[in-house]
Amino acid sequence: MSTPETAQTLRVVTIDLQGERFALETRHVREILDPGPTTLVPNAPAFLDRLINVRGRVVPLADLRLKLGLAPSDTTIDTRVIVLEVPLEEEAVTVAVLADKVHEVREIALVGMTQTPRFGLRCRPDYVRCIGQLGDDFVIVLDPGPIFAQGRAPDPVPATHS
């Protein structure tokens, strides 16, 4: 996990995934779109198996719920696509992610930021930039670099119960 910058706040956009609140730093966010048509990519990792058209560019579409070990869900009226620029191997890569709901852009005071615990999280600690406090609640600020890094072992597939 990275250590927080010396600035007093961290600017994030807050999102919901399967009823849980997460955040992404706005420095990674390029735009937020309504969902549109997607194209399935055979043999791609389950969390990154679709492509979308973003202003004439072909962009991979990730379902972070799957990557974070959450259950997939259907698209709703609140579902949004967040287009990100992710630093990978010294290069910025454009990728889009699904969010069940986008809430707001806000500042999180670094005073409320804490180190990522090594246990008690549903997702891998290296996917977490930090944990911030929003009012009385905590929010996990995701680090998209490790989430999309190449050459990592695949995440375990969440068990499904029939």
Image (cartoon, grey):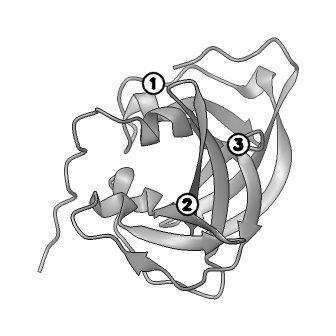
Q: Which of marks 1 and 2 is in front?
A: 2
Does residue 12 show up? yes
Specify the amino acid type for callout 1.
Answer: Pro
142 above or below 35? above
The answer to whether residue 39 is left or right of residue 4 is: left
Residue 137 seen in the figure? no
**Which of 100 and 135 lies nearest the eye of the viewer?**
100
Write the residue at 72% across / 71% down: 55
Q: Is the C-beta separation of discs 1 and 3 under 8 Å?
A: no
In this figure, which residue is indicated by the disc labeled 3? 28
Whichever of labels 1 and 3 marks the residue nearer the N terminus, that label is 3
**SS label for mark 2:** strand
Badge 1 marks a residue whose secondary structure is loop
Rendered position, 130 above or below 106: above
Q: How crowded is mark 3: few (under 14 residues within 10 Å), some or many (20 or more)?
A: many
Above or below residue 137? Residue 90 is above
Q: Position of residue 17 (x, y in %)?
A: 52, 62
The residue to which callout 1 is attached is: 117
Residue type, mark 2 in image: Val
Comparing 34 with 88, the one in front is 88
Give the mark nearest the N terminus, 2 or 3. 3
C-alpha separation, residue under disc 1 versus residue under disc 2: 25 Å
At x 45%, y 57%, the residue is 64
Q: Position of residue 54 (x, y in %)?
A: 66, 69
Q: Nearer the viewer, mark 1 or mark 3?
A: 3
First in sequence, mark 1 or 2: give its number: 2
Q: What residue type is labelled 3?
A: His
Q: How crowded is mark 1: few (under 14 residues within 10 Å), some or many (20 or more)?
A: few
Q: Which mark is residue 97?
A: 2
Spatial CA distance of label 1 from label 3 is 23 Å
